[in-house]
Amino acid sequence: QVQLVESGGGLVQAGGSLRLSCAASGRTFRSYAMGWFRQAPGKEREFVAVISWSGGSTYYADSVKGRFTISRDNANNTVYLQMNSLKPEDTAVYYCAAASLGVVTTTREYDYWGQGTQVTVSS
């Protein structure tokens, strides 16, 4: 079992930056690919980024490519999402998730989810 706790969300002006963290419990953290998703009010949860268990492979949604960077620290069981050049349309609750299947991008392929952290970008 993996428990995930996100932090780092908040209110930021357009063009600003935030770094989200996701702390994982359990010694099997490095067995999972880790992903970030987001859900805006009235919308479905959507894929943002994913990183392989080793950190050697990453994949991003087109909407965040070049602005967001996903990384992980297996020694400290933590995954990060660095978000730069934020836009109002990035406003959402951000979730981290763990996938035993590897680098996957759909919600149904993820095994564990955090509770989410709110990111609000003002214009």
Image: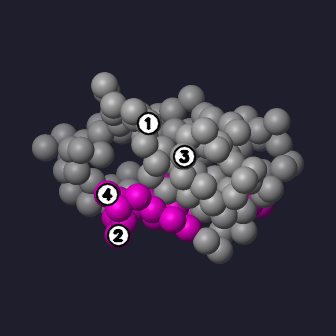
Residue under the point 61% across and 71% down: 57
Mark 3–mark 4 Cα distance, whole angstroms, equals: 16 Å
The vertical placement of 55 against 88, above or below, is: below
Q: Which mark is residue 63?
A: 4
**Residue 113's x, y, as percent?**
63, 35
Disc 2 designates what residue? 66
Q: Is residue 116 left or right of residue 55?
A: left
Residue 23 at x, y = what percent? 66, 44
What residue would you read off at disc 3? 106
Q: Earlier in the sequence, mark 1 or mark 4?
A: 1
Residue density around tag 3, few if under 14, some if 14–19, many if 20 or more, within 10 Å: few
The verdict on residue 62 being magenta is yes
Residue name at image x 64 percent, y 44 percent: 109
Region in magenta = 58-82
Mark with earlier residue (3, 2): 2
User: Which one is earlier in the sequence, the residue at label 3 or at label 4?
Assistant: 4
Residue 10 numbered tag: none
